[in-house]
Structures are given as C-alpha cells and as structure tokens.
Amino acid sequence: MLRILLKRLVLMPFLILGIVTATFVLAQFTKGNPLISIIGARALDNPDIVAAAKARWGLDKSLPERYLIYVDNLAHGNLGTSFRTKQPVLQDLADRLPATLELVICAMIVGAVTGILLGVISAQFRDTPADHAARLFALLGSCIPMFWLGLLALFVFSVQTHLLPGPGRLDIRSDPPNTVTGFMLIDTLLAGDWDGFVDAVRHLILPSLVLGWSVTGIVARMVRASMLDVLGQDFVTMARAKGAGEGRVLFNHALRNALIPALTILGFTFAYLITGSVLVETIFSWPGIGSYAVDAARSLDYPAITGVTIVGGLGFLIANLLTDIAYAAVDPRMRSAA
Amino acid sequence: MSAHTILAIGPGRRLYSRFANRLSWRSAPVILGAVIILGAIIIAISIPWWSPYDPIALAGRRLQPPSWGHWCGTDALGRDVLVRTLYGTRYSLTIAALVLAAGVSIGSLVGAVAGFIGGLLDSTLMRLADITLSFPPILLAMAIAASLGPGLVHTAIALIIVWWPIYARLMRAQVLNVKGLDHVDAAVVAGALPSRILFKHIVPLCWSPILVNMTMDVGQVILLASGLSFIGLGAQPPTPEWGQMIAEGASSFYSWWIAMGPGLAIFLVSLSFNFLGDGLRDLFDPRSRAST
C-alpha cells in the first residue's frame, strides 16, 4: 500500500502539469474575444486602447511564451487576475472557498448520514418493501435535477410557508460578523452573535439537504452492498450467538466493518458535490466558488475559469489521495498489500 | 428445457426467453422505465405533427397558471409550457444519444487498443484519460463550453470530452480480462491478424458492462447537459430545452409551473434510464441478481 501511495505521490506533479496544460490549451480554443470583457465592446475600435490592453494582459506574446509565463506564474501561486473583478484569481478563490466548504461539508454529512442509514435498512430488510422504498428514495436523489429541486424547495419553504429563509448565507438586513475563518457558523459564534448563528444554520438547511440528497444514493448503494457482504460473515453470527441485541450487531459489529469499503467512494462523492455545488450555489445565491465559476464562465473571464478548473482538479486529486490514505489507515490488510 | 432445445432456438430467442423467465413484479421498474423511454422517443419524433401550439410562438396570455387550455400553464412570453416540455425531449434525447455514441466509440476504441497493445501507448493513453478524469465533470464541461462559446453543439462536445475516459477505462479492463482466455490463444495460434483478434475475438465479449453503463449514464448526461443550459452555457433562448426552461422559471420565480414541466421531465427520463440500466445489469450479470 505504501508503494501505491508513493507511486501516486510521484505521479501527482505530472497529473498537475497535465491539468495545467489542459486548461491552458482549452483557454486557447476560445471563440469569444476576451478583450470585450477587459475594455468593453466600445473601446475595440480604438487601436491604441486595444494595443495597450493586449500588452497589459500579455495577449500580444506568442503561444509558447504565454504558456511558459503561465506555468511560471502558477508555480509562484499566481493564477492571474480576473478580467471581471480585477482582483487576483487566487484572492477571489480564497475569499469564496470557505462558503463552498461550509456547504459541501454540511451536504456531505447529510449525504453520509442518510446514505448509511438507508444502506443499513436496505441490507437488514433485504428484498422487502422497506428495502425497495429505501433504494427508491436514494435513487430519486440522484435523478432529480438539483437546480429544479432547489427552486421548488425555496418556493415551498421560503415563499409559501415562511418556514425557512430565502437565498444567501445570512439575512440581508443583518450585519455579517467579522470574517475570521470565513465559515459563517464559526464566525457568528466567535462574534458571540447567537441570533446570527441560528440565522446561518437556517440558511444552510435547504442547500445542504438538496445537495446532500444527491449523494445519498451513491453512499446507500455502497453501504448496502458491503453490509450484505459483512452480515453473512461468521463474526456477525458469533455476535448474535453471544446474545448481542440486533441494533448492537448491526451498528457496532457489522457497520464498522462495512464502512471500510464504503470509504473508497469518498473521493467520488466529492466530485459529485463539487458538480452539485455549482448548480445549488447558483440557485441559492451562495457566494462560493461554484457561483464564481458560473459568473466567470458567463462573462468569458478566462483567468477565473482556468483558476477554478485548476483548483477544482487539484482538490479532486487531494480528495482521492486522502481517500487512499484513509483506506490504508482503517484497513490493516491494505497496508501490507502492495 | 434440455440443452438440445436451447441450442435449437438460437441466441435471439434465448435472450427473449431469459427476459420472459424473469417477468415478475420485480421487473416492474424495468418495464415502467422502458415504457417511459419509448414514449419519450415517440413524442420526440412525432411532436411536430400533433402539437397544438408552436413551441416558440405566443400561445395565450402570459404567466397563466395551469388550466384546461394550457395543462402546464404559460410562461413569461405566453408560450405553452407543456408543448415546450414535450419539444424538449428532442434536445435532451438527441444530446444524450450524440454524447454517448461518440463518447463510447472513442472511449472503447482507445481502451481496446490501449489494453490490447499495452506498453508505452497504453500508459500514454491512460494518463491522458486520468488527467481528464481528474477534473470534476461540471468544471471541465464549463471550461470547455465557455471557451467554445455557448450552444448545444458545444455542450455536446464538452460532454464527449468528459465522458470518453470512463469508457476507455472500462473497455481496457474488459480487454485485459478477455485477452488471457483460451479462444484468443487459439486465434493467435491459428495465425489471425492482431486487428482480427482484437475486433473479432476480444471486443465482442466486452460489450455487456459497457452497454449497462451507457444506459445508466443517459440520465447523467441529460442532467449535466440541462445543468449547463441552466447556468446559461448550453441551449440559448428561445430553444425549448429543459435546463434553459428551468432557468426561465427561476427568473419568473413566483410562477412555479414554468419549471414544473421540464423539471419533472428530466427527473422521469433519468429515473427511467436508471431503472432500465438496473434491469440490463441483472440480465447480463447473474451475480448481481444474487447479491443486490
């Protein structure tokens, strides 16, 4: 296992270079004229302004030169400057990352808890109506378009019944707390703002439920399969024979072992949640990386798009690596296997 | 049934009787899925002949809630939502067919050649697939769609680039499995050309997991394509594409019915393909029947 991990680590820089090159090549295929979003369509007639803008943004250099400059900048942590916000892309992303992380983590908790519960129920009551209902519920989550579900949820819970607040992270009339960590839940608590904390929680409920439900199915399917495997094994029969209660057998004996293979899908789930967060953030006006990516794509802001793509790719690589490490950590057999 | 009768009926009938033997209430979802998909295909082909309204022309007063005249209401421009939703099947099914046909062809070819030849070619092609797979799909699709410019064809290209590596990996794994079987050795001994061995003796045995995966992926392609249209990178107005229609519904937020038709349509079609894929998997892989 150590060898596999090392091999992965050695491959990582090449993958990263591949990702970087791929995004650079992509940006060259552009049909739209990025100058429009830099200087505006009206100034395009003025050759002086166009030449100045080209020189300022390095658009007058040759392709290999631009590639080298790009890679060199990246190596120094410089993702370029956004055409739209006129800020360094890295800064923009750092500002918005906590909002996305907060949402994705909450959604992951929702997805994991519902997925594990449904998976256990399905396995325990295999081939009964309870199993079919649990599987159907899990499947629905991955078939309903999130952007539509979010819209419906906002309409029903916010507009019609006023049970939950509308889009955004906090009530627009309230003062946001000082940004310390960027996580609204932590910042409001640090500021001693209890009402703000409750407000932040209430704003998180709908987007995390919508986003979390989309991965319930993946988790439930995996947990069900590995629970079925485990439930047939001798140590489970042994636990039952000792007279352990069914709940104890299921959760303490079986589930603990069944969760190990389920860990492998963590990285995969992450990709799903990133995909979902782009759509859910758009619906819920969530100021995270997803909505940033959408705004960037709509206004042909290439530095921002390539930045988001690179960061997303890196995040995905890291998530997969962490999954491998976690897998090695929980399953002793994996450590020795090469 | 004795071995002789099985041999006598031939492969076509055998597949049919395998289906027929499994007909029970458990196959209800598969049948439901197949019926909905068939219905969607028929609607997509025939809608211009019987549609009561034009999908992009005024059909009544603006923003009318559902009524007998307009079962799903009208949108902000007075167009009939149901008619537009039904027209939407054409775009979604076409894009799914296009993306999967191209993605599966390219992916399987790359995977088959990589797995069969091996060596440097194999590792180069597979690293290329790894790089593509290391992006979250929507970000890659967004970057591609944004560089090419918005539009349905560009969305399709973006999705093909996202999807081919999945099938390259799947096909490669299959080819590696089948490559070691005895009948392949027999073909080698008989002096068959490598291309003949690959395409006549190996690839035909590799299709079933790919077919199952393809069926399951139709829903995912439709979801992602409509998601891209929803954020404005796919189909452009006034195209009656589902994601695009939901975006219109989001901008006339209080008229909930505008997004209802297309949302339900995406959901039903992708659920149906999932049901059908489950059924196909049971059919091809008896082990999955026993364990799941």
Image: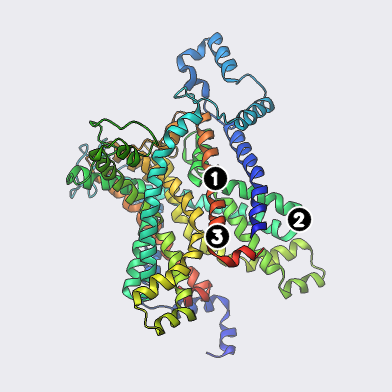
Residue B273 seen in the figure: no
Element at label 1: loop
The residue carrying mark 2 is B119
Badge 3, how many Cα within 10 Å: few under 14, some, many 20+? few
> Which label's residue is closer to the chain start, 1 or 2?
2
The amino acid type found where label 3 is placed reads Ala
Closer to the eye: label 2 or 3: 3
Figure quadrant of residue A214: bottom left
Image position, residue B236 (x, y; %): 41, 36
What is the CA distance from the residue labelled 1 to the residue labelled 2?
Answer: 25 Å
What is the CA distance from the residue labelled 2 to the residue labelled 3?
Answer: 33 Å
Element at label 3: helix
Badge 2, how many Cα within 10 Å: few under 14, some, many 20+? few
Give the quadrant of the C terminus of chain A: bottom right
* Residue at the limit of the structure toward the bottom, as seen here: B2
B55 displayed left or right of A5: left
Name the residue: 34% across, 53% down: B265
The amino acid type found where label 2 is placed reads Gly
Image position, residue A226 (x, y; %): 47, 69
Same chain, marks 3 and 1? no
Name the residue: 25% across, 35% down: A171
The residue carrying mark 3 is A329
Badge 1, how many Cα within 10 Å: few under 14, some, many 20+? many
The residue carrying mark 1 is B135
The amino acid type found where label 1 is placed reads Phe
